[in-house]
Image (cartoon, rainbow, N blue to C red):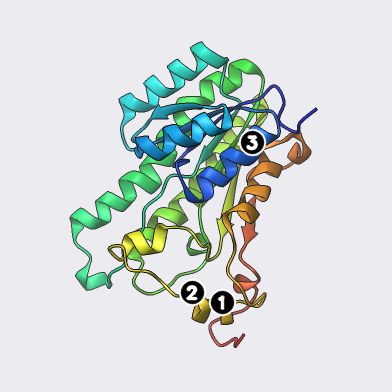
Amino acid sequence: MGRLTGKVALVTGAAGGQGAAAATRFAAEGAEVVIADVADAPGKELAEELGARYHHLDVSDEDQWAEAVATTTQACGPITVLVNNAGILHMAALTETSLADYERVVRVNQIGTFLGMRAVAPGMVEAGGGSIINLSSIEGLRASPMLTAYTASKFAIRGMTKVAALELAGSGVRVNSVHPGVVETGLLPTALGGVEVDLSYVAKRVPLRRVAGPAEIAELVLFLASDESSYCTGGEFIADGGVTAGHSLSSFG
């Protein structure tokens, strides 16, 4: 029997990167998986490959969340695992960050997470429990230059996770945040307009001397989705190769 047998899992931003890795592991462990994304072609392709379902979902749209939850519940039963993974990155100095760019990041990362939690919570409560996993970042624990909007959204996810965990604990719904460090996905190249990024310099600054692969983060997300983490709620789970164990004067190179 798989670790997620009998669970219905919706994963946002699952057409690629960390989301796709989580969806793949979930399917392998027996979950009924719904891949949610705005990237329809790769999302549908992955869903077909995994024997999963695909649903177009703009996480910043309240009505689309309602439709995704209703459609999934009708087809599969109540959602018992939600992974709020969808996110975007904008890099600019504070004085060069436009209000439009700030709001764009917040709408996807922060509001998308809020809407997702709110949309699935009633069904999870009615089902007698569930697990919500919110993807934050080490930028939700510390700060980096050039990431005002992204850092604000990831700190917000950290805080919202704790509030939801406290409110839903009595109903058996667990809510935790995951804080990855640098992961080799398309997030950074996309933010830089498609420019390929050499992460070898960054890797030298990580105590483990490498960046993470999406599959490594997926293992942590799988743990939180499974009953193995039954006593974990309101927690911050860090997978950063040791970066946040030090401070700005630490040298790993």
Cα distance in 3D space between marks 3 and 2: 28 Å
Q: Residue at x 25, y 51 (%)?
A: 103
Q: Residue at x 51, y 16 (%)?
A: 73
Which of the numbered marks, if any, corresponds to residue 199?
2
Q: Residue at x 65, y 78 (%)?
A: 207
Amino acid type at mark 2 = Leu
Q: Which residue is mark 1?
A: 203
- On the question of residue 62 being in view, the answer is yes
Q: Which residue is mark 3?
A: 26
Give x and y (percent) for residue 176.
61, 44
**SS of the residue at dot 1?**
helix
Neighbor class of circle 2 (other Cα within 10 Å; few <14, some 14-19, many 20+) is: few
Horizontal side of 131 relative to 164 (left or right) equals right
**What quarter of the picture does the C terminus occupy?**
bottom right
Q: Is residue 241 above or below residue 136?
A: below
Cα distance in 3D space between marks 2 and 1: 6 Å
Neighbor class of circle 1 (other Cα within 10 Å; few <14, some 14-19, many 20+) is: some
Amino acid type at mark 1 = Ala
Residue furthest right as drawn: 1
Which of the numbered marks, if any, corresponds to residue 75?
none
Give x and y (percent) for residue 56.
37, 30
Of callouts 3 and 1, the N-terminal one: 3
**SS of the residue at dot 2?**
loop
Of callouts 3 and 2, the N-terminal one: 3
Give x and y (percent) for residue 165.
60, 38
**What quarter of the picture does the N terminus occupy?**
top right
**SS of the residue at dot 3?**
helix
Assess whether mark 1 and mark 2 are in contact (beta carbons under 8 angstroms).
Answer: yes
